[in-house]
Image: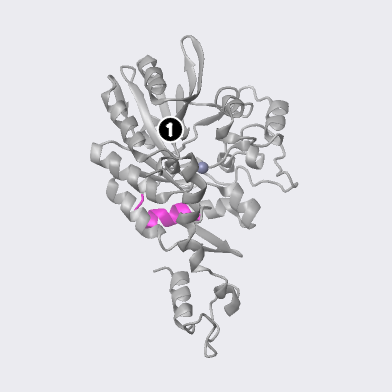
Amino acid sequence: MSPLLARLRAHLARRSPDGAASPSASRDADAPTGRTGAVEAIDVDEFASYHAQAMENYRPLAAPFHLYRQFIHAIEELERVRVLPMHRFVRDRDGSRRTIVFRHDVDADPGMALRCARFLASRGLPGSFYLLHTAQYYGVFRGSTFIRNPALRPLVRALIVCGCEIGLHNDALGAFLFSGVDGPAHVAGEIAWLRSQGAGVRGTVAHNSAPVYRAANSEIFAGRRLWPRDARSADGRALPLEVLDERALGLEYEGTLAIARDPAVPDEARAYCEAGPGGGVRSEAWMRTFLTGNPTCRWDVDMQVWPVGCGRWVVAGRSAAGGIFHWSVELDVVLDALRRLPDGARCMVVIHPEYFMAD
Ligand SMILES: [Zn+2]
């Protein structure tokens, strides 16, 4: 048990049944702010109600889980295809086959992520899962103190049992801008914590896109600044870019596979970021620009496949005939695009597990 959770439990044990602080409750000598009140601000119900909130938010957009299974089975049927975890996908090239990675960005539904991981394990396939440290299923900030959700540790252990790759879904800039903490330090700390739980974290995947914060979360790493500028948030705060060293942290890759454009186009990149994220994955125009004409970066992959809810998919990439962009298509179009990939091509499937929670 973490010292903080132990303090929380000890504190709750001292409370009277109606929830009022017991008169005998004494101040914790090492309480985060030196005041009992700071401990009282921890609301366990907030964690307990999280899943119901996520269900309410995402269920209207979700497809039933059998579509995930159907997709995986269809991949298994393809010829000359191999599936690799991200840490191998980024470096292993094979000109005789198509290579696919299943990247799971666990934004909102860890239970569904675990269901995906267990299904992949049952098929003997690798999957890569990135846990979002700023999501409530992971933890919450109270002042500068980070309180991990009590359900997080069992989640990590269950994912480890599945044999999947586990990494951090990096939201350093979100932690910095919305919680007022040292976001990159928080990222480094959570990588260390995940490893202390037995997860062999080899990489991160940046959460959100550059227009959300006016910089990509991947830019906190040295050498990953997408274009030269004095990066500031919409409210003028200097963003902490290039402050972490991936090699020193034992990280082997950044799994969005974003690469700076060469040459950079600073005016276009700035305008793109200042316009904001717009409709995001719900907008055809926005996704087309994000995936096929992004002024901030290009993608080190031949094709990306994104399930975007309601059983619909987006396919984007390049082929011998030029650019590919299929918006809001059904699975047969995705599979047809995969069959057309030449040998040696690399395809990244970006899965938000919450889009498969409808049953
Ligand atoms: Zn995300």
Q: Nearer the viewer, residue 312 or 148?
A: 312
Task: Judge whether residue 347 can be spotted in this image.
Answer: yes
- Work out which residue is located at the far right of the displayed protein and give it: 236
Dividing the picture into quadrants, the one containing residue 95 is top left
Magenta: main secondary structure: helix
- Residue 141 at what x, y percent from top left? 56, 61
Residue 153, given in percent of the width and then of the height, sits at 38, 59
Q: Quadrant of the N terminus?
A: bottom left
Residue 34 can be seen in this image: no
In the foreground, 339 or 94: 339
Question: Which residue is at 54% across, 69% downward?
Answer: 42
Colouring rule applied to residues? one colour
The CB of the residue at mark 1 lies under 8 Å from ligand 1: no
Crowding near pointer 1: few (<14 within 10 Å), some, many (20+)? Answer: some
Where, by quadrant of the figure, is residue 297 drawn?
top right
Picture layout, residue 289 above or below residue 162: above
Query: For the point 33% across and 55% down, which residue is it?
Result: 157
Q: Is residue 237 on the magenta stretch?
A: no
Of residues 7 and 30, the one nearer the viewer is 7
Q: Which residue is mark 1?
A: 311
In the image, the segment drawn in magenta is: 189-199
Q: Residue at x 55, y 34 (%)?
A: 281
Residue 192 is one of the magenta-drawn residues: yes
**Picture coordinates of residue 184, whole percent (x, y):** 57, 50
Residue 226: horizontal and vertical position, in percent? 61, 32
Q: Secondary structure at mark 1?
A: loop
Seen in the picture, residue 308 relative to 336 is either above or below; the reply is: below
Q: Amino acid at mark 1?
A: Gly
- Tell me if 272 is positioned left or right of 122 in this view: right
